[in-house]
C-alpha cells in the first residue's frame, strides 16, 4: 500500500525558507518525489509529526491552515498515483501529473485551426458584447474569403495563422472592397456563410476597421505565443476620414415633436423615440436596453455598451421638461422598457418619413461613407438614429462650446477628436471669432 511522507532538506540553522517535499513509497520498488510550493523556516518544522510546530510566531489558525495544506497535498499525491496504477516511470512524470491537477488551465488543449483560434480570442480577450458582435462580422467575412480562395484556386485552401502572408492580407483587403460584386458571381458562398442582407459596397472606414480588427487578432496571437507570424506587421491601415457632422436645430427638433401623427401610431411612437434620443444623446443600442430603472431622480443613468468593458463610467443626463413629457406619454405602455422599440432598419426608414412629413428637407453636405466623396443631399434622405446623437452634441456645443462638459453627458472619451469636427460647423462661432478683431 502506498504511503506519503513530508520532509524538508534544509538545516534548522538555516534562516532561509525551505520547500516542503513529499516522498511517495509503494513497497521497495517505488520511490516518487514531489517538491511543493509550500515553504517553511526549518526551525519551525516538526519532522516527527510532519507539520508546522506550535510557536509564538504563528497563530493557531494559520498553523492549522498550513498543516491542512500538507495533509491535502498528501491526499492528492495518493489520488494521482492510484489513478494511474503503477505506470509512472519516474518523479519527473509524477511531477507533471500533479501539476496538471493543481493548475489544469496550463494544460488546456488549445485549437490550432484559424477559426478555432479566432473563437478562443473572442472568449479570452476582454471585449464588450457589442465588440464581440462586430468581431463575429469579421469572422464571417474571413470564412467567406476562405471559401472564395478555395473556389479560385480549385484546391482545399484553408486560412492558417502560421502561413498567412502579406500577400494574403492584400487579397483579403481587395475581397472586402469587392465582396458585393463577388456575391453576384458566387451566391453559393453566401448560402454557406450567410448575412442578414446581401453585401453592399464598403467604404474606406469600414475596410480600415475590419483590417484593424484582424491586426488586433494577430497581435493577441503573438502576445499569447500561438504564433510568431504577423502578416500585418508592416501593413499600413489607412486613416479614418469623417465629414463635418450635420444635425437638426432645436427648432427643427421641436417641429418634429409637434407633428400630429395620431393617424399613424407607429410613426408617432418612432417620432417620440427619436426626439427623446435627441434630448439624451445616447446611442441607439443603449437606448434599446433602457428600462424605467434607468430613470433616477429626474435623470437618465446608464453605462455605454461601447465602453462598458474598457471604461465603465456611469453617464447621467438630467431630463428636461420635453423629455419628461415624452416618457410620461409612454408610461405603462411596455413592461419595464422605456419604449416599445422597433427593428433598427424600420426605425431608420420611419425617421426619414417623419422628416419629410415635417418638411425638414434642406440640403446638407455630407461625406459619402462608401465613395469617400462629399455630396449634397436632402437631410431627410440621409437621416437616421445616429442623427439624434449628433443633434444632442451639436446643439450643446453651440450653446456651451466646452467639449469636457459635453463629453460628461454624451459619453465621449475626454479629449475625443469628434469635437474637432463640430467646431467647423457653427457659423455663430465663426461670427464671434471675427468680432474679436473688429
Image (cartoon, rainbow, N blue to C red):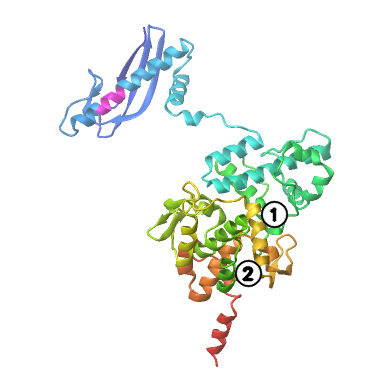
Q: Which mark lies nearer to you, 1 or 2?
A: 2
Q: Is residue 328 left or right of residue 45?
A: right
Q: Residue at x 66, y 52 (%)?
A: 345
Residue 9 in view (yes/no): no
Q: Is residue 160 above or below residue 178?
A: above
Residue 316 in sight from this viewpoint: yes
**Percent of width and height locating residue 422:** 58, 71
- The structure residue drawn at horizontal position 46% and vertical position 25%, both measured from the top left corner, is 100
Is 345 on the left-hand or right-hand side of 392?
right
Distance from the alpha carbon under mark 1 to that under mark 2: 23 Å
Q: Where residue 421 sits: x, y (%)?
A: 59, 70
Q: Which residues are magenta?
A: 65-70
Q: Residue 137, labelled with which disc?
A: none
For label 1, the residue is: 207
Q: Is residue 67 magenta?
A: yes
Give above or below for 152 relative to 73: below
Question: Which residue is at 59% across, 42% downward?
Answer: 221
Q: Which residue is mark 2?
A: 246
Which residue of the protein is positioned furthest toward the bottom in this rendering? 438
Please state, as top left, top right, bottom left or bottom right, where the N terminus lies in the image: top left
| Mark 1 neighbour density, 10 Å: few (under 14) some (14–19) many (20 or more) | some
Q: Residues within 10 Å of mark 2 (few under 14, many from 20)?
A: some
Q: Where, by quadrant of the figure, is residue 115 drawn?
A: top right
298 or 42: nearer the viewer = 298
Q: Is residue 1 left or right of residue 233?
A: left
Residue 137 in percent (x, y) is at 65, 45
The image quarter in which residue 423 lies: bottom right
Residue displayed at 39% across by 22% down? 34
Name the secondary structure under disc 2.
loop
Image spot of residue 293 (x, y percent): 42, 51
Amino acid at each position: 500500500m502506498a504511503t506519503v511522507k513530508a520532509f524538508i532538506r534544509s538545516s534548522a540553522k538555516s534562516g532561509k525558507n525551505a520547500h516542503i517535499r513529499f516522498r511517495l513509497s509503494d513497497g521497495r520498488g517505488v520511490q516518487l518525489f514531489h517538491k511543493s510550493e509550500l515553504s517553511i523556516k526549518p526551525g519551525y518544522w516538526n519532522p516527527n509529526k510532519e507539520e508546522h510546530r506550535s510557536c509564538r510566531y504563528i497563530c493557531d489558525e494559520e498553523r492549522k491552515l498550513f498543516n491542512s495544506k500538507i495533509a491535502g497535498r498528501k491526499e492528492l499525491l495518493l489520488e494521482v498515483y492510484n489513478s494511474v496504477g503503477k505506470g509512472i516511470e519516474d518523479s519527473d512524470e509524477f511531477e507533471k501529473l500533479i501539476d496538471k491537477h493543481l493548475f489544469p488551465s496550463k494544460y488546456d488543449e488549445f485549437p490550432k485551426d484559424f477559426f478555432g483560434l479566432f473563437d478562443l480570442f473572442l472568449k479570452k480577450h476582454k471585449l464588450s458584447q457589442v465588440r464581440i458582435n462586430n468581431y463575429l462580422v469579421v469572422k464571417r467575412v474571413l470564412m467567406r474569403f476562405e471559401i472564395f480562395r478555395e473556389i479560385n484556386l480549385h484546391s482545399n485552401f484553408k486560412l492558417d495563422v502560421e502561413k498567412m502572408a502579406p500577400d494574403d492580407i492584400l487579397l483579403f483587403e481587395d475581397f472586402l472592397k469587392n465582396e458585393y460584386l463577388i456575391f453576384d458571381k458566387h451566391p453559393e458562398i453566401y448560402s454557406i456563410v450567410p448575412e442578414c442582407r446581401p453585401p453592399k459596397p464598403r467604404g474606406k472606414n469600414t475596410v480600415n476597421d475590419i483590417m484593424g480588427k484582424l491586426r488586433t487578432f494577430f497581435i493577441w496571437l503573438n502576445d499569447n505565443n500561438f504564433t510568431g507570424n504577423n502578416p500585418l506587421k508592416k501593413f499600413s491601415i489607412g486613416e479614418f476620414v469623417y465629414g463635418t457632422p450635420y444635425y437638426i436645430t432645436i427648432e427643427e427638433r421641436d417641429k418634429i415633436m409637434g407633428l400630429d401623427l395620431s393617424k399613424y401610431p407607429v410613426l408617432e411612437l418612432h417620432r417620440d423615440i427619436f426626439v427623446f434620443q435627441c434630448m439624451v444623446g445616447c446611442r441607439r443600442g443603449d437606448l434599446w436596453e433602457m428600462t424605467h430603472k434607468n430613470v433616477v431622480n429626474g435623470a437618465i443613468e446608464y453605462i455605454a455598451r461601447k465602453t462598458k468593458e474598457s471604461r465603465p463610467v456611469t453617464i447621467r443626463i438630467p431630463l428636461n421638461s420635453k423629455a419628461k413629457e415624452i416618457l410620461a406619454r409612454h408610461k405603462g405602455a411596455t413592461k419595464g422598457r422605456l419604449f416599445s422599440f422597433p427593428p433598427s432598419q424600420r426605425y431608420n426608414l420611419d425617421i426619414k418619413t417623419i422628416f419629410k412629413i415635417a418638411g425638414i428637407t434642406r440640403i446638407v453636405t455630407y461625406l459619402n461613407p462608401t465613395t469617400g466623396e462629399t455630396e449634397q443631399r436632402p437631410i431627410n434622405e440621409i437621416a437616421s438614429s445616429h442623427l439624434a446623437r449628433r443633434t444632442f452634441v451639436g446643439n450643446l456645443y453651440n450653446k456651451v462650446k466646452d467639449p469636457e462638459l459635453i463629453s460628461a453627458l454624451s459619453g465621449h472619451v475626454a479629449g475625443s477628436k469628434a469635437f474637432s469636427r463640430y467646431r467647423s460647423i457653427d457659423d455663430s462661432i465663426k461670427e464671434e471669432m471675427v468680432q474679436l478683431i473688429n
